[in-house]
Image (tube, grey):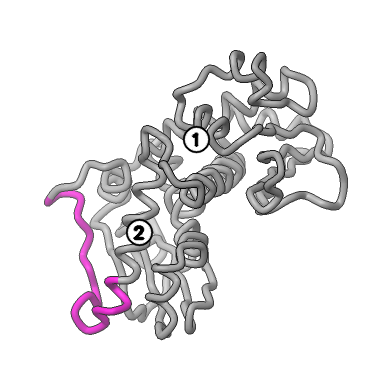
């Protein structure tokens, strides 16, 4: 029997972290080239006796560098698959506890070596971005890291709400139609948002353009964003210095900040 915390973590890995593979494969030119000739279904799964078919997972359909992400869907015949022996083993692996007990079966690694290699390289890139403890030195990687964190946090909060996480679901349940956004000044391409209403939630990538967001957590630069996202800067001090602008009432910044920490804790 899985603990509720294990299920929360697993949902964040499957539905918030792993979709970032598509983002990284499209944004990092060296990785993008690796997938130009790939036509395959690539899957990540975990054996689970409580699930239909005894397995849960998600997969990607890659056609010549064009990606489609299929959440909560197990493909019966993927060309490449990382299959974990349990939900707990998968969680431990993605939290950095790598060893014989947590390593997945690597199906198709020999027959489809080029595809497997490209996917593994992208997975390792994602891991290095999300597990970093300090900002990278080049601006391009900083931008990608901030984008990935924005997407992870907005999607992670939404996924926890859909699972009925008590604190988050109570917050969304009492809310009218509101949009909470993450942004960096002068970089609209690095944005994400979370729309909530009466217990429902939806995460989105990019700017929300249908109306002005109810609240935006806006950073002055990528470095300022990473200072908060990596936990090396104090949020109140960042606000005082003008490195973090809360477009909205400060109490809503506190709420979002708490949920960011919650997602971060479940993913580490």
| Quarter of the rendering occupied by the C terminus | top left
- Nearer the observer, 116 or 156: 116
Which quarter of the image is occupied by the N terminus?
Answer: top left
Quick check: 246 above or below 48? above
- Give how far apart the Cα atoms at labels 2 and 1 are: 20 Å
Image quadrant of residue 75? bottom left
Q: Residues within 10 Å of mark 1 (few under 14, many from 20)?
A: many
**Disc 1 target residue:** 263
Is residue 196 toward the left or the right of residue 124 in the image? right
Residue 123's label in the rendered image is 2
In this view, the residue in front, 194 or 125, is 125
Please tell me whether residue 110 belongs to the stretch shown in magenta.
yes
Quadrant in which residue 117 is drawn: bottom left
* Total marks in image: 2
**Magenta segment:** 100-117
Do residues under tags 2 and 1 come within 8 Å of each other at their CB atoms?
no
- The reply to whether the magenta stretch includes residue 75 is no
Residue located 29% across and 45% down the image: 88
Which callout, 2 or 1, points at the residue further toward the start of the chain? 2
């Amino acid at each position: 029997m899985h603990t509720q915390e294990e299920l929360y973590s697993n949902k964040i890995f499957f539905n918030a972290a792993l979709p970032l593979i598509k983002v990284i494969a499209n944004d990092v030119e060296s990785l993008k080239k690796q997938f130009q000739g790939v036509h395959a279904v690539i899957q990540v799964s975990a054996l689970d006796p409580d699930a239909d078919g005894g397995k849960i997972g998600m997969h990607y359909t890659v056609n010549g560098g064009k990606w489609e992400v299929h959440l909560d869907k197990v493909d019966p015949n993927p060309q490449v698959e990382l299959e974990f022996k349990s939900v707990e083993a998968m969680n431990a692996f993605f939290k950095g506890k790598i060893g014989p007990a947590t390593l997945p079966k690597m199906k198709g690694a020999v027959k489809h070596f080029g595809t497997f290699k490209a996917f593994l390289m992208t997975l390792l890139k994602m891991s290095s971005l999300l597990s970093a403890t300090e900002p990278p030195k080049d601006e391009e990687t900083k931008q990608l890291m901030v984008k990935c964190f924005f997407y992870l946090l907005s999607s992670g909060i939404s996924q926890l709400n859909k699972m009925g996480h008590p604190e988050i679901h109570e917050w969304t349940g009492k809310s009218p139609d509101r949009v909470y956004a993450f942004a960096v000044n002068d970089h609209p391409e690095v944005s994400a948002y979370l729309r909530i209403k009466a217990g429902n939630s939806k995460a989105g990538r990019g700017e929300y353009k249908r109306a002005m967001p109810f609240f935006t957590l806006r950073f002055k630069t990528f470095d300022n964003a990473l200072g908060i996202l990596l936990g090396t800067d104090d949020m109140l001090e960042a606000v005082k210095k003008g490195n973090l602008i809360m477009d909205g009432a400060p109490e809503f910044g506190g709420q979002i900040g708490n949920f960011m920490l919650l997602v971060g804790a479940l993913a580490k």
